Image (cartoon, rainbow, N blue to C red):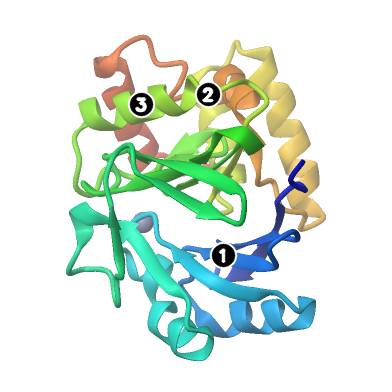
Amino acid sequence: MASALEIVAVPAFADNYLWLVHDADSGEAAVVDPGDPAPVLAEAERRGWRITRIFNTHWHPDHTGGNLAIKEKTGARIIGPAGENGRIPGLDVALEEGDHVSLGAHRAEVWEVPGHTLGHIAYVFDGDRVAFVGDTLFVMGCGRLFEGTPEQMHYSLGRLAGLPADTRLFCAHEYTLANARFAAHAFPQNREIAARLAHVEQERASARPTVPTTVGEERATNPFLLARDTEHFADLRRAKDEFRSA
Ligand SMILES: [Zn+2]
């Protein structure tokens, strides 16, 4: 049986997490959304991990800015959404819905999850109960609709929420505290949200990361998954854009 994927967060910029993923059996490592090459290369070197793949979820520079430098240093292949070909530096392999990528014996299915950007994809390692979701779903939140429609994003989030409850979701930003405060504001009667907000406040006060989350936790406390329908989702997204917590 294959050993479990090792996944570590490499913090970058103000609040990004660049995910380093290692398969001990093959010795291969991948980095998901390397906005900044230096901390990724340093962490991989420190651990003795060999980066062979770069997985991009979407074209935004804080997710792709390190592509070329990491490729130059390691020879890694740059893998990302076909829908954003031309906007992703050095893209070698363009992926569409239903395509598969692998890291050693671990296999991920590619899901197109438009909304934040139109070509945004997620990497779903269903055998590992792990998904890399970029800026689509955040802990207790979701990405801003820069390119897509509320319909698209609501559908994309619904797909991710349909994964098994114990699936761990790795998103690309530490936005949880602001998201939890908005969730408590939008759903003031929801006790699970209130309890999670209290927990998140403690974690962040000690500067501990709140990512990954699980599908089960998100189904219970993510306001955008609690939306009754697309119209409600759109109202919540608009309200979140304008929300300023005290
Ligand atoms: Zn983005």
The image quarter containing residue 51 is bottom right
State the count of labels.
Answer: 3
* Sooner in the amino-acid sequence: mark 1 or mark 3: 1
Q: Is residue 14 above or below residue 44?
A: above
Q: From the image, tell me which residue sits under label 2.
A: 163
**Label 3, label 2: how many angstroms apart (C-alpha)?**
23 Å
- Mark 3: which secondary structure? helix
Q: Position of residue 147 (x, y in %)?
A: 19, 47
Q: Residue 141 at what x, y percent from top left?
A: 48, 36
> In this rendering, is residue 90 above or below 135?
below
Label of residue 236 in the image = 3
Measuring 59% from the left and 22% from the top, which residue is drawn there? 221
Q: What residue sits 75% from the left and 32% below the top?
A: 198
> Badge 2, how many Cα within 10 Å: few under 14, some, many 20+?
some
**Is residue 246 among what the camera can see?**
no
Of labels 1 and 3, the one closer to you: 1
Residue shown at 44% from the left, 79% from the top: 66
Residue pointed to by mark 1? 30
- Looking at the image, residue 206 sits to the left or right of residue 245; the answer is right
Residue 21 visible in the current orientation: yes
